[in-house]
Amino acid sequence: MTKFFDPLETRSHAEREADLMAALPRQVSHAQTRSPAFATILHGVDGAAINSRAALARLPVTRKHELLERQQAARQASAAGDVFGGFSALRFGAHMPRVFASPGTIYEPEGTRKDYWRMARAMHAAGFRPGQLIHNSFSYHFVPAGSMMETGAHALGCTVFPGGTGQTEQQVQAMAELRPAGYIGTPSFLKIIVEKAAEMQVALPSVTRALVSGEAFPPSLRDWLGERGIAGYQCYASADLGLIAYETEAREGLVLDEGVIVEIVRPGTGDPVAEGEVGELVVTTLNPDYPLIRFGTGDLSALLPGHCPSGRTNARIKGWMGRADQTVKIRGMFVHPGQVADIARRFPEVIKARLIVSGEMANDSMTFQVEAASSDSGLDQRIGAAIRDVTKLRGTVELLAPGSLPNDGKVIEDARSYK
């Protein structure tokens, strides 16, 4: 069995940089030609001249909220408007087998190229190999996570059991009977499955590895799984960009994927920061179907010095270190300040609202605090139903008297422990 997924992982820094900077001007020019949004955003830019990181850094950063705003504007302008806000180079038809939705709502296209989301590399680093069965417990509806992992597994030469989310006892039964080589999904759900298996007194000896994503993977949970014979590795990916970085057996940061150009910039700006300084992760993808140029993820991270001890030569990031804005990820789902406002607007009694996320990662909870002019007996229940409708998550509602919440402009407070 080969240690590396392909020769790209062990290129010299000079060779990789030359290849990326040769691909960059082609991708910028392609985005200007095939993506109406980037034709506008990059108007007047000579795409052929964007052939260095310094030139790239002079381009504007496009953030997720701008993508959402352009999508919403296009849909409101016309019933036949571009649902992707002009960012996709593909249109409905044979070259776009699926469309997915992320909270917001933001729509993302899926193309037909093999391993479209480039997830096979992360699976290989986690120890999965051709000919194995993988139990995939990412969601298969609305969001692309299930398809992202399945297409990567197929590219790697693996068979997939589409477990999806929920139905914990059935998940345990399927694992016990099918004996998959490992699990792919959120780390918190894997913990729930393992605990349920112990409760049911069902052994899962075949599940010895896991690739997890969608939420933080603290060392405490990694060690907990290791004590039960499961080597868990994390990867960092998004519905917009596919794979961004992945963990190796060295356990020293996350190695960048070979199909992206990553910058760390000062939050709120497009200015790159020095190596080791924490900033917002900005990604330029080389995906021609969805050519996002300098896409601001809103996530905080930092570049690590040197190379990965595993022998992979690409740069590494420290991992997910929080959000550059107030958007948070709860149980694998993003929750945006706009969603908090959407919930509050549904109730005339609500004066002000704040969402507080608490607990430890993999066991987090959210409390929706609202100042209300009146508090009839059913208000908290109706707000709770709206929370589920808007965020697809459950939360506790706490009704407060007017003037109780701080006047600090904060809509979402992440009070979780990241130990």
Image (cartoon, helix red, strand yellow):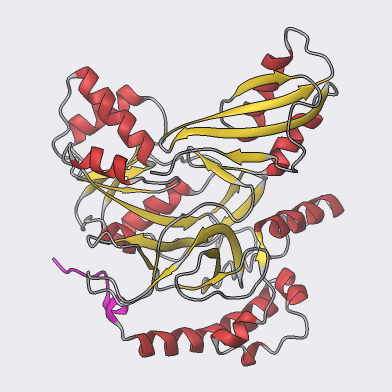
| Picture quarter with the C terminus | top left
Residue, far bottom: 49
Residue 67 placement (x, y as % from top left): 69, 59
User: What stretch of residues is rendered in magenta?
Assistant: 1-10
Residue 5 within the magenta-colored segment of the rendering: yes
Residue 41 placement (x, y as % from top left): 75, 73
Name the residue: 23% across, 62% down: 250
Q: Is residue 346 visible?
A: yes
Residue 182 placement (x, y as % from top left): 23, 44
Number of disc labels = 0
User: As displayed, is residue 73 above or below residue 341?
Assistant: below
Name the residue: 64% across, 76% down: 31
**Camera-side residue: 338 or 48?**
338
Name the residue: 32% across, 78% down: 8
Residue 359 placement (x, y as % from top left): 47, 32
The quarter holding residue 221 reads top left
Q: Is residue 313 left or right of residue 58?
A: left
Q: Is residue 80 visible?
A: no
Q: Is residue 405 left or right of residue 207?
A: right
**Camera-side residue: 272 or 168?**
272
| Picture quarter with the N terminus | bottom left
Name the residue: 20% across, 57% down: 129
Residue 388 within the magenta-colored segment of the rendering: no
User: As displayed, is residue 235 above or below residue 179?
Assistant: below
User: As displayed, is residue 293 above or below residue 374?
Assistant: below
Q: Is residue 132 left or right of residue 38?
A: left
Per the picture, the main secondary structure of the magenta-coloured stretch is: loop
